[in-house]
Image (tube, rainbow, N blue to C red):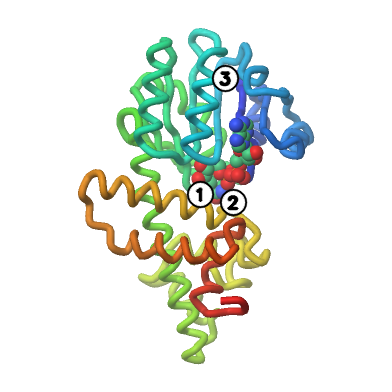
């Protein structure tokens, strides 16, 4: 069992760190939010009052931060200068490929192994330890990270060299955004056609329209237990995070001249939804805008 410093105890990081504790690891966490630090203590973890204190003398660092700028700053200013030789660095945040590669390269310059290991599966998967990890890094770093990731997830895939985990993640989330908008359009149209949404769910969840966006996070409440729609779109995965990921995928598409017309349209729809004041709701709440509910 390892001693792990865990940075970023938000919607995802807190349940992930909790699962590391349940697996028998010693976890010391840090988050800017005192509430989140207290929540980790309640789950049986230790906490530190700074990133430096959190990663002091640990064998492994796991981070789950909002975006590239935080990862760059936290690793550059606090983690790389502080950790002991031989510490394995695992960043699970969703960030751009270039930043992931730059931070891993700075780590390598100090003789430290690092993997990018973004996740899919949402807060439900984080709580149930069933996340999918997409890992970029060397074979040896992957082999070291795998047993740690197995305490938090079910499917651990080595996607290739440094940054390839992030490449997989932005492709995956572009599919998720497009699928979710598809569910929103179809369920809204069903209502207008006089088709009971429960009937559509019973049919499509067993047919070719099926997707995670339907069977795990259905935008219509009452059809799947795990959906944010059952909790008035309390996240879950915020619309702001989805917009961030679509920005990453569109930037990447532009850089490599990939054609992504539906990805571009999905990003525009999420930008509208966020701009109308819904950044902090679950991304599946976009059904309200597509349906034309209330303030839309
Ligand atoms: P979140 O906003 O709930 O959590 C991020 C946490 O990081 C917050 O608690 C914040 O206080 C903390 N933080 C920010 N800057 C910090 C710093 N400098 N030092 C220490 N703590 C700091 O976000 P989340 O939903 O947990 O997402 C985290 C990452 O996981 C994002 O990159 C997101 O895209 C990705 N992700 C989220 C989901 C999801 O369903 N929520 C799914 C897959 C991937």
Of residues 23 and 257, the one drawn nearer to the viewer in this rendering: 257
Q: Quadrant of residue 61?
A: top right
Q: Which quadrant would the C terminus be assigned to in this image?
A: bottom right
Mark pair 3, 2: CA separation: 30 Å
Kindly identify which residue carries mark 3. 78
| Within-10-Å neighbours for mark 1: few <14, some 14–19, many 20+ | some
Q: Position of residue 199 (x, y in %)?
A: 51, 82
Up-down relation of residue 190 to residue 38 (above or below): below
Kindly identify which residue carries mark 1. 121
Q: Position of residue 167 (x, y in %)?
A: 34, 41
Secondary structure of residue under mark 2: helix
Up-down relation of residue 58 to residue 173 (above or below): above
In contact (CB < 8 Å): disc 1 and disc 3: no
Which residue sits at x=58%, y=71%?
223
Q: Is mark 1 within 8 Å of ligand 1?
A: yes
Q: Where is residue 164 in the image (x, y as percent from the top left)?
A: 33, 35
| Within-10-Å neighbours for mark 2: few <14, some 14–19, many 20+ | some
Of residues 289 and 133, the one drawn nearer to the viewer in this rendering: 289
Which residue sits at x=53%, y=57%?
239
């Amino acid at each position: 069992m390892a001693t792990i410093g865990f940075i970023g105890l938000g919607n995802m990081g807190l349940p992930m760190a909790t699962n590391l504790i349940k697996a028998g690891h010693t976890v010391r966490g840090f988050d800017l939010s005192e509430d989140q630090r207290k929540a980790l203590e309640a789950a049986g973890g230790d906490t530190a009052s700074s990133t430096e204190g959190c990663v002091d003398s640990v064998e492994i660092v796991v981070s789950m931060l909002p975006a590239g700028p935080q990862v760059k700053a936290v690793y550059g200013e606090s983690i790389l200068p502080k950790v002991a030789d031989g510490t394995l660095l695992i960043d699970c945040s969703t960030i751009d490929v270039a930043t992931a590669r730059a931070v891993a390269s700075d780590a390598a310059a100090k003789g430290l192994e690092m993997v990018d290991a973004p996740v899919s599966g949402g807060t439900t998967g984080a709580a149930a330890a069933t996340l999918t990890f997409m890992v970029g890094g060397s074979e040896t770093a992957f082999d070291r990270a795998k047993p740690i990731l197995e305490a938090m997830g079910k499917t651990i895939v080595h996607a290739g060299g440094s940054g390839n985990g992030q490449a997989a993640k932005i492709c995956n989330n572009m599919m998720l955004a497009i699928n979710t908008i598809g569910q929103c359009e179809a369920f809204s149209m069903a209502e207008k056609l006089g088709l009971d949404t429960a009937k559509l769910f019973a049919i499509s969840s067993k047919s070719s329209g099926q997707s995670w966006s339907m069977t795990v996070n259905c935008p219509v409440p009452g059809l799947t237990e795990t959906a944010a729609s059952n909790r008035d779109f309390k996240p879950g995965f915020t619309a702001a995070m989805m917009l961030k990921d679509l920005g990453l995928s569109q930037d990447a598409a532009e850089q490599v001249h990939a054609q992504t017309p539906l990805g571009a349209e999905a990003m525009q729809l999420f930008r509208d939804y966020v701009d109308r004041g819904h950044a902090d709701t679950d991304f599946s709440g976009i059904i309200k805008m597509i349906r034309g509910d209330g303030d839309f």
